[in-house]
Image (cartoon, grey):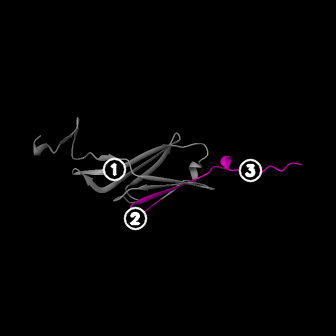
């Protein structure tokens, strides 16, 4: 390939200079009494380059990094199917030191309700 067209052949895929290398980040999932904590390793990303959304019960995370691989920018991306036990409206996200931390609280339906017997 010529240097003029700025393309690179990786396997059978031709990429141009505006494409990104997509990488699955390392993830830790911790469960507590009030929900889940998911920690993503996203070095080189920050709150302005991270996108977190839930659509039809799928939690999607994309984080554009300043890191490169083979001369191409890196995008960390991961998706998870959520259960009804997660309060989607209460999900929070925070970035710090190359980590993205999500807190997924349990929905009211997922908490234990003690029923008084008379």
Q: Which residue is mark 2?
A: 97
> SS class of the residue under badge 3?
loop
Q: Which residue position holds label 3?
A: 113
Residue at x 56% of width, y 48% of height: 88
Nearer the observer, 14 or 51? 14
Q: Residue at x 22, y 50 (%)?
A: 70
Q: Where is mark 1, residue-wise? A: 75
> Does 109 lie within the magenta span?
yes
Question: In this view, which residue lies farthest toward the bottom?
Answer: 97
Q: Residue at x 21, y 43 (%)?
A: 16
First in sequence: mark 2 or mark 1? 1
Could you classify mark 3 by the number of other residues whose Cα lies within 10 Å: few (under 14), some (14-19), or many (20 or more)? few
Q: Quadrant of the N terminus?
A: top left
Distance, label 1 to label 3, CA atoms, is: 42 Å
* Location of residue 12 (image quadrant): top left
Relative to 1, does residue 37 appear above or below in the rendering? below
Cα distance in 3D space between marks 2 and 1 = 17 Å
- Label 2 neighbour load within 10 Å: few <14, some 14-19, many 20+: few
Residue 71: percent from the left, percent from the top? 21, 51
Residue 22's disc is none
Q: Earlier in the sequence, mark 3 or mark 2?
A: 2
In the image, which residues are magenta? Answer: 94-118
Q: Earlier in the sequence, mark 1 or mark 3?
A: 1
In percent of width and height, residue 72 lies at 24, 50
Magenta-colored stretch includes residue 105: yes
């Amino acid at each position: 390939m010529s240097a003029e067209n700025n393309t690179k052949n990786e396997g059978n895929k031709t990429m141009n200079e505006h494409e990104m290398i997509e990488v699955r980040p390392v993830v830790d999932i911790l469960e507590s009494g009030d929900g889940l904590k998911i920690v993503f390793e996203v070095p080189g990303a920050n709150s302005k380059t991270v996108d977190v959304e839930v659509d039809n019960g799928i939690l999607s995370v994309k984080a554009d990094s300043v890191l490169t691989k083979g001369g191409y920018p890196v995008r960390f991306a991961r998706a998870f199917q959520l259960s009804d036990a997660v309060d989607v409206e209460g999900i929070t996200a925070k970035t710090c030191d190359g980590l993205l931390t999500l807190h997924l609280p349990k929905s009211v339906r997922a908490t234990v309700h003690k029923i008084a017997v008379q």
